[in-house]
Every structure is written in structure tokens, then in C-alpha cells.
């Protein structure tokens, strides 16, 4: 429970999985989060950390037609964000009686799939504060998908008119035109048989490099040719995140075996291994400012803060594990365990890089500061 | 009054003084007494003032005393007068006798000159006569001398002519010393005239000398000759300007050859010492071998000493040679050490070498062989220690790997247990044996080892330290989750994936065993017999730090245990993943029976439980310690929850159920799901189950279900409830987790209407029946 008191809480109405830092908002530290409720009306919350840093204020509340599985804020326009949603719940809410029919198997859902997924780019209306019930404006639908969509990626480092969306089998590159409100598929690549994609990350250092995670490996793509360039063989990777500061460094979270840090020039074996969480390590994210500061969220209802600089000599550290097991606990700076449920959402604030927001499944957003641990560096 | 006291001999003394003052060159020197003119004593000084004296006398004395003084003075004056007279006479006497002597001398000198002239004449004549004799004899003497010279020359010539025969005689008599002396004597002549007048002679004698040289060489090389004789021969040969260097080289070669023989024998000894490991009969041959070897070494040493006498300046080569011997000895030893040998055997070899070294040192102490061999022995011993530990490591990993093989081939019930016991024994017994082995090294009184004692202690301590580190690495390698051994990927890659979970468990338990039993034992043992050392300096502390090792293994044990649990849950995870990603949950059909993944799941658990049962001890408190306290409340509450659901199912769908579960959760005590794993059967199994159920929950959360899908989950979970509770220690937590799964499923369900309890029951009963049918014995 250490550090529990320092966190600033904010409760969502329903369960939720995803939270995103609003990077383009340079005036405030804000986060976007969307709920995941099958049967209720879902919401997108724009949360802002008060100037004193003591309170989380709901800056905007927008209804979202479907339950949100993934949410990403546009890195160059604070009003734009993307969501991935499941449309399975649509029928339950709007057409309650379909439930009965569904049971008897009379109604066939989209294209033979039981539930359907969609992805869209949304814009928060201007002057949303003055509107009574502000509606999100759908800029574009990323509707070329036929499979379960996993995530939508923005290029993290700046303005770029491309978007990537990943579903179970395919990787789509979209050209987004916000003014014309269109999104067009620029290219598409199928990952190949037996590779069910589960997520991905866009290299902040290289506009043409994208990593996708699938069941047995992490694959790297060159967006110009849409060809696979590299792969790291590793099973059950949940999440991957590029180090914002160091090129070639990728951090992955795995179900059972913790966190691995890879130098992509040496994909054979990880540079570093962190123990991860008691149960699955769900999400991992590198701090945008402080080198080697890594956050991980796990299904053991905790968020761990790690310090694992990779730029230093790696060999010495791997040896030091053997040298003295006392140091082994070294990389773990703190464990925030004041959560009631599994933590799926995790985001560093890019404006105040010592702050992060975490979101547990019960819909509780907690913003914490890691400042007390930075001094130890 | 004072004059009365003047002693009698005062008079004589004054006389003498006066006389001496008369003859003295400086009159002032006599009056050394600085007289006070104011006293009566001043009468005797030169500065005597009569008037003053009188005045003083008159003032000081009365009449009677004055009269007295007067009489005395008169007497004294008279005395002095007589003295003076005597002195004059004496002087006169002496003068007269002197004149007499001079007169006599004058008369004696007159006749002497004539005698002198006569003498001169006679001496002159003697001289002229002797000159005459000299000249007349000179010629004859010259001739005599010439003749004498000729005779000498002739004799020499004769000698040279005789030389060959003489040499031959010498050869016959083996008097080589004389022969060489003769020959070298004749050499200058041969050199000067050898080509002309003495040609034949020279040839003949050279032939003779050639024979001598040959004989001498033979003598030099023949081992039967005494060393002195051989040394003499060498000296003679050298005198004969024979190229001794080549001889030296030859002899050296011979020595080197004998070296080869020596080498072979070292091997023999090794063999012998190997044999000596076997029953007693080996010992006899052993000693025989050793004595044989010793003999040859002694011979070698003698040869060396002889050689040294013969060629005193060849020390360097000899030193090199001897050192070569030692180096070769140690090379073979090192080769030998690479193999698997006991310290006793090594000691045997070392002892042999040491005796050799001592033998050789006796004859050639300049080679500092003891120091040299000490260094070499140091290396050899170090290697020995290292290789011993290596073999120990090998043994242990062999014992462990046997697990893999045996459990693969014959899936016996107790194979893991057997393996654990075997590896435990391998570790404990092995390290004890090693210690015992090294003890022998320490206990031996061989000087070589005594000097190295400190080093050995350090090496052993260091060896253990390194050994346990290596063992730790090996464990990680075997367990397949090694981060530090990425270098040998080929090895890990080969069997890394196929590492048996059981093996990991064995390793975990073994780590604990090492930490709790082996390390203390070894520490004790080391303290008992390997204390001291300190050759590597105290600032480094002792080489063997049990605390560090214990810590390493404690953490290793925990890591391995976690790893084991991870491996187990990973398997289940894969199972669950398949289960949840394959079917289309939204179009799920009505549940007809408990899904077979439950069987697989339970089977995995059973497998794990059987492994765990073999390796880990039972926990102390079984099951009940938790259920009394918070556990019971939690479970009862969850029961309530379930009942709630049941009742609700009769009415209609549970719309506000989510809120309710949330509320329930709020009030419910947070069940500690992830507790610390202990080294007990129950704890491990419970943790595994908990993790699996948590995974199940997470998988469920990722799906969307229709009513039938939800009901299927409900059914599966309901079925799992009983068997899980049987195997698990922490019922409350498991209950909680099972409920959580159902809650998660209901949350993710479009239409969460649970199955009616009777239907649920019926399906479960059917499954149970089927299960019993399939495994008639095991449940």
C-alpha cells in the first residue's frame, strides 16, 4: 500500500481498460479514458489534473456508442483521438429483444462473426464546455477491417498524417485527412497464417518502423514496403513499447515471464529481464523523459515502477544478478498496489513526465507522481 | 723557633741545589719558590734582602731567640764555607785527570800510519792474483757450459725420439696422465720442427696420442669407470686440445636420453598409483615401481653430478636439463590432474616428484629446484582443486539430468523423489568427499605440500565459492530460465524449451537443501580443517563466504519455485487461451456438458500435485488455518452472492448486478490472492491454482458471451469448485477467484442469465459419473 496515499483518484462509472495521455495539450496534464461496458452507455472522459496537482477534474464527458477496447489520443491535436470498439453490445442496448432471438441463433451478426469491432477517429467538439450534451464528432471510420481490431496507432513523435490499425490478421496504413474528414487505406499487409496479431507499437525514432506483437513473436515492419524486416521470437507478448529516448530499445510485457528489454540490433536475446508481476504483466510503458524508467501494470492489481537503464553496460548488470541477489530487487523502485482490480491502462504524462495515470478495471483512474523515486537515480 | 725544626738532611739538599744551580744554564730557574721577602724562609732565595730579614727577625723574636739564631747562623755559615771548599777541590781533580788522558792519546797515535799503508799493498796484490786466475779459467768454463747445453738438447731430442715408444708404454700401462704430460711437453718442438726433422716422430706420437684420445673418450663415456677417472679423462682430453664441447654435447645428449627413460617411468608411477587405488596387490607393484623409479632418478642424479665434475662450466645446461625434467614431470602431472583423480593419487605423484627433486637438488643445488617445483606444484594443485570442483559440478548435474532421462523413459511414481535424493546426496556427499580429499593434502607432511598449505586452503575455499556460483548458474541453465548464460545459447536452446517442470522443482528444493544443510556443513568443515590460509591477504576477507552463497541459493530457490509455478501455469494458460480464443462465444450453444478443458486443467493440476508431493514437504497446518478467520466470512459472502444470483435467475436478468457485485466487493475484505509461496506441497499447488484461476478470469474478461456462453462458463466453474477445494490450502481465495470468474463472465455477457440450479446439478452429476467411468481408481 505504499504510495497509495499520494495517488489522486478519479472514478469512472463503468469498467474501463484504456487510458491515454493527451500529448497535444501543452497547457494541461490531461488524460483521455474510455469505458468498457457491454450493456451500458459508454463514455469517454477527458480528465485534467488541476493546476495544483491535487485533483483530477472531469473536463469533458462524451458518450461513445460502443464499449471501448482501445483509445489513443492524437499526438498533435488535442481534440482528436481514436478508439477501437466492439459493436457486440449495440444490440443489447438498442434492441433488447434481439437477445432472445440471438439465443436461438436466428440472427447472424456481421459477416458471420459473432461480435464485430470497429475503429474510428473522433473529434471533441469545440466549445464542448458550453454545450449541454456534447457529442463526439466522428471524423473517420477505419472500416476496412474484417477481423477483430486490436489497436490504432499514431506516430508518437509528432505530426504525421498516417495512422496504423491492427486487427487479428492485418496491418493497415491509413492516410488521415482531418480537414476533409477522410481516412483512406494506403496499404495493407497480412501478417501471415497462424500469426494472430495482438497489438503493436510505432517506433518514435523511425517513421517507417512498426512493431506488432503476435502469439509467438514480435514482428517488425517497414511501412514503405510493408515487408517484415525483423522478428523477435517470444511467446505470449501482451504489450510492447518503444523507448522514447533510446533508439533500438523495445520493452515487452509477457503474460507469465515478466518484462523484457530488447535491443533490436540483437534480437536473439533480451538485454535485460525484469521479474514483472505476480500474475500477467499487461502493459508496459517507457517514460518519455527519464532514461530507463519503466512502468508496468499487471493483473495482480498493481503497478510497478522500474529503473532499468539500458545504455549502461549490460553485461555487468546481468552478472550482478549472479553476484548478489540483494541487488536483484534493485530495478524495482516501487510497487503501487492500492488497486482493487487488474490494471490495464497505463500512461505517462508527456507534459509532466514524472506523472503517470493508471486505470484499473473497476474504472478507477489514479494519477501518481514518481518524483520521490527520481531522486534515487 | 722555625730554624729549630729544620731537618738534618736539609743541609745536603741545599748542597745539591747549589751545585745544580751552578751548572744550570739559567740561574733564575732555581728559585722557583716565589718567596715572600717578609718571611724568614726567604734567606735561601736569590731575592734575599738582608736588612729586611734582620728587621723582621728583630721585630719578631726576643733576645734569647736572637742569640740562638745568631749561633745557628754562624754554624751554618761555617758549613757553607766548607762545602764551597770541597766543591773547588773536586773540580780541580777532574780537570787533572782529563789532561792525563789527552796526553796518553797523543802518544798512541804516532805509529799507526805505516801499518795502514802496508795493509793496502797486500790487498792490491791479492786482487791482481785473483784476476789472473779468473781469466785463465774463463775459456774452460765457457766450453763446459756449451757442452752442458748440447747435452740437454740432445736429451730433449732423445726424449722426442723416444716419445712414441714412451707413449705406447704409457698406453700399455694406462698412464695417460704421463703420456699427456709428455706429449704436451713435446708439443712446442713438434710445432716448430714437426714438418721437417721430427716428422716421423711426430706422426708416430700423434698416432699414439690418437689412441690415447680414443681410449680417453672410451673412458669418458663408459659408465663403469669411476667418476674421477672420467673427470681425469675429460681434463686430459681438454689438455690435448680435443674438441671437448662436442663431447660435452654428446654426453648431454646421453643424459637427455636417460631423461626420456625417466619420463616413461613417471607414467609408470601414475599407473601404479592408479592401481594402488585398487585392492592391496596394487600396493606391492606400486612400491616396486616407485623404488625402480627412485633408482633411475638416483642414477640420473649421479650422472648429473659426474657430468658436473667433468664439465664444471656446464652448469647452466645442467640446470636447464634438470628443470626440464621437473617441468616434464609437472606437465604429466597436469595432464594427469585433468583426469579424475583423488588427492591421494595426486599426492603420490607429487611425493615421487618431490623425492626426485630432492635427489637432484642434492647434486645441483644451483638449479633451485625446490623453489622451481614449488611453483609448478602450485599450478598443478590449483588445477587439481579446480578440476575436482568441476567434476563435482559435473556429477551433480549428471545426477540431475538423470531425472530428465529417467522420468522421460519410465514415468515412475517416485522418480522425482529418487532424483532429488540422488542429487541431494551428490551435493552433500560430493562436497564432503571433496573436502575429505583435500584434507589429505593438508594432513600430509610432504614438505612441498606443507609449504603450499595456505595456498591450498585458500584454493579450496575459493573453489567452494566458485563451485557454488557455478552450481547456481548450472541450476539456472537447467531450469531454462537463464538470463546470464545467454552466451551459450546453443546449449540452452537445445533443451531449454524441453526443460521438465519436475526438474525445476527438484532444483528449487535442492537449492533450499544446499542453503540449509550443505552450506552449514561445509562451513563447519572448513572452519575445522581449512581455517587459516590468508595467503591472499586479509583485506579480501576469507575466500569462502557462506553468507553470500546462502543468499544466492535462497533467492535461487525462490526463483526456481516461482519458475516452476510459472511453468505449470503457463501450460494451463495455453490450454485456457485455446479454450477461450477458439470458439465463437457470442454464438455459443446451450451448455450440454462440462467442457473438456476442465478435465485437462484438472489433469495438469494432478500432474503438478504428484510432482510436488514427491519433492516438497507437507505444510504444517492443512486447510483449516485460514477458514476459521476471514476466509469463512469471505466464502460465506460469496455463497450469498451465488444465492443471490440463483434467486435472480428465477426472476429476470440481472441488470444492476454489476453495481451489486461492485458493492459487494467494496464491503468484502480484499482477499489476498497472491501470497508468498512457501516450500510446502499445499502452498505450491494453491499458488498454481490461484494463478490459473486468475488467468481464467482474465481470459473471460477479454471475451463477450451470449447467455449460453455464460452458462457454459458457469457450469465449468461450478464443476471445478469441488475438486479444486480438495487440492487447495486456501479455500477462501479459490472460492473468491472462482466467483470472480463467474462475475467476469456475467459482466461480459450480453444476457447474463445463470443456469437453473437443477440443470446445473444434473450436468455436473453427469460429468462426475462420466469421470468416474473414465478413471475408475484415481478419484
Image (cartoon, rainbow, N blue to C red):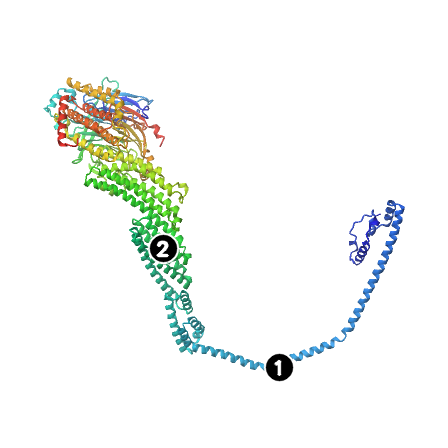
Residue A214 visible (yes or no): no
Most distant residue in the left direction: A106
Asked if the residues shown at circle 1 and circle 2 are in contact, with their CB atoms under 8 angstroms apart, the answer is no
User: What is the spatial separation of the Cα atoms under label 1 and label 2, in whole angstroms?
Assistant: 86 Å
| Subunit that carries the residue with mark 2 | B
Query: How many C-alpha atoms fall within 10 Å of the one at disc 1: few (<14), some, or many (≥20)?
Result: few
Q: Are marks 1 and 2 on the same chain?
A: yes
Quadrant showing the C terminus of chain B: top left
Tag 1 secondary structure: helix
**Comes first in the chain, label 1 or label 2:** 1
Where is mark 1, residue-wise? B132
Q: Position of residue B174 (x, y in %)?
A: 40, 72
Residue at 36%, 51% (x, y): give it. B377
Q: What numbered label is drawn on residue B145?
A: none
Q: Is residue A28 left or right of residue B57?
A: left
Q: Position of residue B744 (x, y in %)?
A: 20, 24
Viewer-side residue, A218 vs A60: A218
Query: How many C-alpha atoms fall within 10 Å of the one at disc 2: few (<14), some, or many (≥20)?
Result: many
Q: Position of residue A118 (x, y in %)?
A: 18, 27
Q: Relative to A14, is B112 above or below? A: below
Residue at 83%, 64% (x, y): give it. B92
Q: Is residue B49 left or right of residue A140?
A: right
| Subunit that carries the residue with mark 1 | B
Where is mark 2, residue-wise? B326
Location of residue B628 (image quadrant): top left
Q: How many tags in the picture?
A: 2
Q: Where is residue B242 in the image (x, y as percent from the top left)?
A: 40, 68
Viewer-side residue, A368 vs B304: B304
Tag 2 secondary structure: helix
Q: Relative to A285, is B116 above or below? A: below
Location of residue B653 (image quadrant): top left
Amino acid at each position: 500500500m505504499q504510495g497509495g496515499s499520494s495517488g489522486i483518484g478519479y472514478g469512472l462509472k463503468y469498467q474501463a481498460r484504456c487510458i491515454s495521455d493527451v500529448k497535444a495539450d501543452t497547457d494541461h496534464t490531461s488524460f483521455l479514458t474510455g469505458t468498457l461496458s457491454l450493456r451500458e452507455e459508454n463514455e469517454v472522459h477527458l480528465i485534467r489534473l488541476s493546476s495544483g496537482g491535487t485533483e483530477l477534474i472531469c473536463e469533458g464527458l462524451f458518450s461513445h456508442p460502443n464499449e471501448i477496447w482501445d483509445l489513443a489520443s492524437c499526438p498533435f491535436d488535442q481534440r482528436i483521438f481514436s478508439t477501437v470498439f466492439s459493436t457486440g453490445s449495440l444490440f443489447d442496448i438498442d434492441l433488447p429483444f434481439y437477445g432472445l432471438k440471438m439465443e436461438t441463433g436466428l440472427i447472424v451478426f456481421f459477416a458471420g462473426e459473432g461480435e464485430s469491432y470497429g475503429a474510428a477517429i473522433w473529434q471533441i467538439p469545440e466549445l464542448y464546455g458550453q454545450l449541454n450534451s456534447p457529442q463526439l464528432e466522428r471524423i473517420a471510420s477505419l472500416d476496412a477491417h474484417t477481423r477483430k481490431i486490436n489497436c490504432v496507432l499514431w506516430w508518437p513523435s509528432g505530426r504525421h498524417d498516417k495512422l496504423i490499425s491492427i486487427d487479428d490478421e492485418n496491418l493497415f496504413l491509413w492516410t488521415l485527412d482531418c480537414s476533409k474528414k477522410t481516412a483512406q487505406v494506403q496499404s495493407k499487409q497480412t501478417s501471415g497464417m497462424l500469426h494472430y496479431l495482438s497489438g503493436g507499437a510505432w517506433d518514435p525514432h523511425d517513421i517507417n518502423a512498426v512493431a506488432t506483437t503476435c502469439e509467438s513473436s514480435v514482428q517488425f515492419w517497414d511501412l514503405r514496403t510493408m515487408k517484415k524486416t525483423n522478428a523477435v521470437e517470444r511467446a505470449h507478448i501482451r504489450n510492447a513499447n518503444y523507448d522514447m529516448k533510446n533508439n533500438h530499445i523495445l520493452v515487452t510485457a509477457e503474460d507469465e515471464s515478466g518484462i523484457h528489454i530488447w535491443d533490436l540490433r540483437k534480437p536473439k536475446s533480451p538485454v535485460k529481464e525484469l521479474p514483472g508481476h505476480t500474475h500477467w504483466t499487461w502493459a508496459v510503458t517507457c517514460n518519455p523523459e527519464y532514461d530507463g524508467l519503466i512502468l508496468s501494470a499487471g493483473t495482480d492489481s498493481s503497478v510497478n515502477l522500474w529503473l532499468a537503464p539500458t545504455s549502461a553496460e549490460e553485461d555487468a548488470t546481468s552478472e550482478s544478478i549472479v553476484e548478489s541477489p540483494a541487488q536483484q530487487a534493485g530495478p524495482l523502485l516501487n510497487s503501487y498496489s492500492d488497486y482493487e482490480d487488474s490494471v490495464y491502462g497505463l500512461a505517462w504524462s508527456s507534459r509532466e513526465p514524472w506523472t503517470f495515470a493508471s486505470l484499473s478495471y473497476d474504472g478507477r483512474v489514479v494519477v501518481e507522481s514518481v518524483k520521490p523515486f527520481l531522486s534515487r537515480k | 723557633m722555625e730554624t729549630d725544626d729544620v731537618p738534618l738532611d736539609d743541609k745536603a739538599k741545599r748542597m745539591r741545589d747549589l751545585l745544580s744551580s751552578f751548572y744550570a744554564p739559567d740561574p733564575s730557574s732555581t728559585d722557583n719558590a716565589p718567596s715572600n721577602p717578609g718571611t724568614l724562609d726567604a734567606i735561601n732565595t736569590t731575592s734575599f734582602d738582608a736588612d729586611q730579614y734582620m728587621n723582621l727577625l728583630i721585630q719578631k723574636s726576643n733576645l734569647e731567640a736572637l742569640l740562638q739564631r745568631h749561633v745557628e747562623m754562624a754554624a751554618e755559615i761555617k758549613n757553607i764555607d766548607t762545602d764551597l771548599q770541597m766543591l773547588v777541590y773536586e773540580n780541580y781533580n777532574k780537570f787533572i785527570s782529563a789532561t792525563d788522558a789527552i796526553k796518553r792519546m797523543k802518544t798512541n797515535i804516532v805509529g799507526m800510519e805505516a801499518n795502514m799503508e802496508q795493509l793496502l799493498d797486500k790487498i792490491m796484490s791479492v786482487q791482481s792474483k785473483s784476476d789472473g786466475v779468473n781469466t785463465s779459467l774463463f775459456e774452460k768454463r765457457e766450453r763446459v757450459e756449451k757442452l752442458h747445453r748440447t747435452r740437454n738438447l740432445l736429451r730433449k731430442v732423445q726424449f722426442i725420439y723416444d716419445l712414441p715408444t714412451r707413449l705406447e708404454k704409457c698406453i700399455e700401462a694406462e698412464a695417460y696422465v704421463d703420456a699427456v704430460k709428455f706429449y704436451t711437453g713435446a708439443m712446442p718442438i713438434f710445432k716448430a720442427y714437426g714438418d721437417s726433422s721430427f716428422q716421423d716422430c711426430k706422426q708416430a706420437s700423434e698416432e699414439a696420442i690418437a689412441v690415447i684420445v680414443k681410449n680417453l673418450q672410451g673412458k669418458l663415456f663408459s659408465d663403469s669407470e669411476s667418476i674421477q677417472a672420467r673427470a681425469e679423462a675429460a681434463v686430459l682430453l681438454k689438455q690435448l686440445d680435443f674438441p671437448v664441447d662436442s663431447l660435452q654435447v654428446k654426453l648431454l645428449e646421453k643424459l637427455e636420453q636417460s631423461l626420456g627413460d625417466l619420463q616413461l617411468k613417471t607414467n609408470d608411477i601414475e599407473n601404479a598409483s592408479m592401481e594402488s587405488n585398487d585392492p592391496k596387490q596394487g600396493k606391492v607393484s606400486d612400491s616396486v615401481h616407485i623404488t625402480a623409479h627412485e633408482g633411475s632418478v638416483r642414477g640420473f642424479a649421479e650422472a648429473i653430478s659426474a657430468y658436473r665434475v667433468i664439465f664444471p662450466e656446464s652448469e647452466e645446461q645442467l640446470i636447464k636439463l634438470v628443470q626440464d625434467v621437473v617441468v616434464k614431470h609437472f606437465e604429466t602431472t597436469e595432464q594427469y590432474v585433468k583426469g579424475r583423480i583423488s588427492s591421494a593419487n595426486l599426492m603420490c605423484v607429487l611425493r615421487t616428484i618431490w623425492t626426485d627433486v630432492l635427489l637432484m637438488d642434492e647434486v645441483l643445488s644451483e638449479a633451485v629446484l625446490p623453489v622451481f617445483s614449488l611453483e609448478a606444484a602450485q599450478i598443478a594443485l590449483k588445477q587439481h582443486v579446480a578440476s575436482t570442483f568441476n567434476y563435482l559440478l559435473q556429477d551433480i548435474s549428471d545426477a540431475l539430468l538423470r531425472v530428465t532421462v529417467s522420468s522421460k523413459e519410465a514415468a515412475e511414481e517416485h522418480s522425482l523423489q529418487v532424483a532429488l535424493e540422488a542429487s541431494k546426496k551428490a551435493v552433500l556427499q560430493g562436497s564432503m568427499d571433496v573436502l575429505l580429499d583435500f584434507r589429505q593434502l593438508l594432513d600430509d607432511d610432504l614438505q612441498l605440500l606443507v609449504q603450499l598449505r595456505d595456498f591450498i586452503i585458500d584454493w579450496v575455499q575459493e573453489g567452494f565459492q566458485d563451485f557454488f556460483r557455478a552450481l547456481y548458474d548450472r541450476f539456472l541453465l537447467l531450469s531454462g530460465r537463464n538470463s546470464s548464460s545467454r552466451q551459450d545459447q546453443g546449449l540452452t536452446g537445445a533443451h531449454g524449451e524441453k526443460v521438465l517442470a519436475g526438474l525445476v522443482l527438484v532444483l528449487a528444493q535442492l537449492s533450499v537443501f544446499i542453503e540449509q544443510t550443505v552450506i552449514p556443513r561445509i562451513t563447519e568443515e572448513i572452519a575445522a580443517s581449512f581455517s587459516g590460509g590468508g595467503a591472499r591477504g586479509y583485506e579480501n576477507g576469507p575466500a569462502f563466504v557462506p553468507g553470500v552463497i546462502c543468499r544466492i541459493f535462497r533467492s535461487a530457490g525462490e526463483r526456481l519455485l516461482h519458475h516452476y509455478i510459472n511453468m505449470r501455469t503457463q501450460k494451463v494458460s495455453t490450454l485456457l487461451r485455446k479454450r477461450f480464443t477458439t470458439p465463437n462465444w457470442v454464438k455459443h450453444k446451450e451448455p450440454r456438458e462440462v467442457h473438456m478443458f476442465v478435465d485437462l486443467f484438472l489433469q495438469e493440476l494432478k500432474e503438478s500435485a504428484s510432482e510436488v508431493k514427491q519433492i516438497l514437504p507437507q505444510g504444517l497446518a492443512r486447510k483449516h488455518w485460514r477458514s476459521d478467520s476471514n476466509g469463512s466470512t469471505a466464502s460465506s459472502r460469496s455463497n450469498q452472492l451465488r444465492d443471490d444470483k440463483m434467486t435472480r435467475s428465477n426472476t429476470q436478468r440481472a441488470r444492476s448486478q454489476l453495481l451489486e457485485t461492485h458493492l459487494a466487493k467494496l464491503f468484502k475484505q480484499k482477499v489476498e490472492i497472491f501470497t508468498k509461496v512457501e516450500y510446502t506441497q499445499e502452498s505450491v499447488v494453491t499458488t498454481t491454482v490461484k494463478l490459473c484461476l486468475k488467468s481464467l478470469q482474465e481470459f473471460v474478461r477479454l471475451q463477450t458471451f451470449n447467455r449460453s456462453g455464460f452458462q457454459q462458463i458457469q457450469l465449468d466453474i461450478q464443476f471445478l469448485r469441488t475438486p479444486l477445494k480438495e487440492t487447495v490450502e486456501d479455500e477462501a481465495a479459490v472460492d473468491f477467484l472462482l466467483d470472480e470468474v463467474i462475475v467476469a463472465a456475467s459482466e461480459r455477457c450480453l444476457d447474463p442469465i445463470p443456469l437453473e440450479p437443477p440443470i446445473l446439478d444434473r450436468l455436473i452429476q453427469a460429468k462426475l459419473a462420466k469421470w468416474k467411468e473414465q478413471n475408475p481408481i484415481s478419484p
